[in-house]
Image (cartoon, helix red, strand yellow):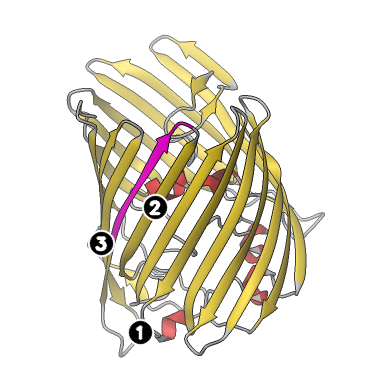
Amino acid sequence: MKKIFALSVIAAASLQSAHAVEIKAGDWTVNVGGIVNAYYTVVSCAGDAVGGLALGSRGIGCGGADRRSTVGNGLLPNGLVTSATSKQGDYDVKALIGIYNSTATDSAIGQNSVVDVRQAFFTFGNASMGTIKLGRDYGIFGASAILGDMTLLGAGAPVQATQRGRVALGHIGAGYSYLGNYGQMSYSMPKSASGIGFDLGVMSPVADTPVVAGPTFRSGSTPQLQAQLTYAADGFKGWLGAKSQKFNSVTPGIADMTMRGFEIGGSYAAGAFGVLANVQGGKGLGILSDADQGDVKSKNYLLQGTFKTSDKLKLGLSYGLSKNDENTAGTGGLKLNANLTAGAYYSLNSAITLVAEAGQTRSKGFDGSSARMNGVSVGGIIFF
């Protein structure tokens, strides 16, 4: 089995997969692979009607009902990923396109034709100069947290408002903000013998994506900047990240806003045990995406522990919290989302992982209101 080709899916950095098809023609090698997953999720919701992006509320967590079930995607979508690699002169060259789609919709006859092209980029570089990337890909900020999240292979918070037509949320909005997809020009320095790495990206600026209110900001002429410094040695990996972008106001009476985000985290594996901790903070980070709550200061926390009982079975417990520091119009009154998930991950073989998770998502408002969503997810995922 070969390591899944880099960045073919969001889990590429930590998973093993076979290539479904590998074609060699001259200097080029073309690989075609992908991912398919499905989870039966059942959720029940109780408590108050918390405003804003309250993931544990009836409106979002249970899709407007007290109880709901879905057979849909976990945190990862289904995807078909094609890459081509070559050695051209002094440079290692690669091009990749990833096309993604969801499992569940609310119709048995409607066309499931919504396609999400999250990745379409090419890279070039070598061991001495590092690697330059041009195109559309995942962001740098937040990548280490979501890649290390055990619920990446499962569902985490099985929020019904997103699972039908898209995916479950893992700890997005309840532990970290989504890393996003951007048109970008980025650079990764060569990996040093000391284990230090550095990534810097110039991202196409984005507008805000509010869910509970109308648009407040648009993208300006200044690009978004993202950077991450990493260190890895002897089972330990640590990271420091940052991102920033200026947003121009489209609402009279509201000033322009500069999003600033910072991140620090680390993971450590020793034998059968593994731990991970990550903290994000800043202004304009949003709950699900950049500036989706406007000019709001917030913090995100993620803590996780795992234990391998055998080569095939891993057990884990993870807790995430996303908290707004101030009550503004953009929050809709939401103070925090928190999710606790317990999971069991069984490697049926080198391609298929079977998953069972149970957890609770809680939301609280600045006015003292609270809501909770209990959820169970059972299913599996295949990388090919």
Q: Residue at x 36, y 62 (%)?
A: 206
Q: Quadrant of the C terminus?
A: top right
Q: Residues within 10 Å of mark 1 (few under 14, many from 20)?
A: few
Q: Which residue position is annotated with label 2?
A: 277
Per the image, label 1 sits on a secondary structure element best described as loop
> Closer to the N terminus: mark 3 or mark 2?
3
- Can residue 290 be seen in this snapshot? no
Q: Which residue position is annotated with label 3?
A: 244
> Closer to the N terminus: mark 1 or mark 2?
1
Per the image, label 3 sits on a secondary structure element best described as strand
For the residues labelled 3 and 2, the Cα–Cα distance comes to: 23 Å
For the residues labelled 1 and 2, the Cα–Cα distance comes to: 38 Å
Q: Residues within 10 Å of mark 2 (few under 14, many from 20)?
A: many
Q: Residue at x 44, y 68 (%)?
A: 322
Q: Which residue position is annotated with label 1?
A: 251
The type of residue carrying mark 2 is Ala
Q: Residues within 10 Å of mark 3 (few under 14, many from 20)?
A: many
In the rendering, which numbered label is found on residue 339?
none
Q: Quadrant of the N terminus?
A: top right
Q: Is residue 128 left or right of residue 160?
A: left
